[in-house]
Image: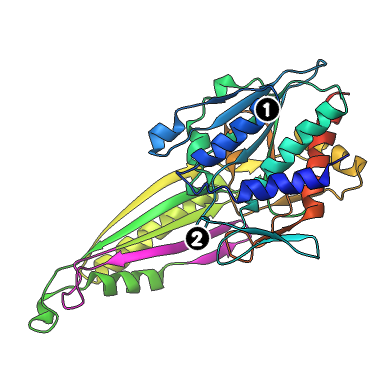
Amino acid sequence: MVNKKRLIDSFMRMVETDSVSGQESRMRDLLKEEFSKRGLEMEEDNAGEVLGGDSGNLLLRIPGTVEGPTLLFAAHMDTVEPGRGIRAVLGDDDIIRSEGNTILGSDDKAAIASMLEAYDMLKENSEQHPPLEFLFSVGEEQGLQGIKLFDFGKLKAEYAYVMDAGGAPGTIVVQSPCQNEIEYTVYGRAAHSGINPEEGLNAIQIAARALAAIPCGRIDAETTCNFGIIEGGIARNIVADYCRIKGESRSLSRTRLEDISNQLESLFRNEVKKEGGRAEVEINFLYPEVSLNSEEKVVRLAVKAAEKIGLRSELIRTGGGSDASIINAHGLPCANMGVGMQAVHTSAEHISVQDLVNNARLILQIIREASR
């Protein structure tokens, strides 16, 4: 049975431990401390050094007590901003929220706290279990940076579960998109805006006209694109000679992703050329699509476990990427699981105590089903 007080205390301690992307060392130290108390040692890689951060990815191996497929459970340690000085508050409605103008950090510390609780339940109940691996990544919120640097040759797992999706426990992501990041740059010609503006060529205005001519938002049921950052110019009294826009495109289909990305580039270049400017477009592939069959064992195991403990299982597709995208790309079947986090990446983020409890119950039940 889940020790609710222990789980709540663990979760609140975790979210109040600052770990914004690139600065996960305090969370790393907390996890090393907790698992060391339980007689387990964690292995840290050099991802932090490569990324210029202060922590690497953490891998924990838990020897099995019975034969069976090794299972991997994964979550990320980092959070987005504003994620410093978080204070968690448990309300009378059994909802945990942040106090003040910060996120809560249930993305993804709800998963980590639940993984720790599931392990404690295993040991307290002296339950038989197959070999387990817990992986805690860094830099997930910055484009899955940490997991991309992880050495998958260290894993023995046959099936994997990333605990990092929206939706209630029992939600299973079977489709997620591939993504390109796109950087558009326009070059114009500088001039004094009050003395000789006619001799200039305003890159910001050209960029605005080009952006107005190309698609943005939802393109079709599988595909989206966006512009998220725009910067340019030097001073308000100088005709801007450059403008840079950072955007993205996503699709559940690799072919469609390539098509829409090429279309965005072509339209942008043509519009800038019409206005007399010069364009550069750089497209970088961030992560691959995930498409799991409902009959695959990694999915069937999760469905069976959810239903066994009275949770509604739901197979969904999502428009977001996760560490599961990279894990699947390395040939390890991996489902991303809903953990009940709500309004993530905002100061309204919250999670119910019941969802925390159900996360721990579900992890434990998946382990039990894999032991049969």
**Quadrant, the C terminus:** top right
Quarter of the image where one finds residue 306 = top right
Residue type at the position of mark 2:
Cys
Q: Magenta part of the protein: which range?
A: 216-243
- The residue depicted at 56 percent of the width and 30 percent of the height is 58
The numbered disc on residue 37 is: 1
Instruction: Tell which of 347 and 182 is nearer to you.
Output: 347
The stretch drawn in magenta includes residue 230: yes
Q: Residues within 10 Å of mark 2 (few under 14, many from 20)?
A: many
Quick check: 32 above or below 17? above
Please, what secondary structure does the residue beneath circle 1 have? helix
Q: Is residue 16 left or right of residue 307?
A: left
Badge 2 vs badge 1, beta-carbon distance below 8 Å = no
* Residue located beneath label 2 in the image: 225
The structure residue drawn at horizontal position 54% and vertical position 45%, both measured from the top left corner, is: 78
Q: Position of residue 348 (x, y in %)?
A: 63, 66
Spatial separation of the CA atoms under disc 2 and disc 1: 47 Å
Residue 130's tag is none
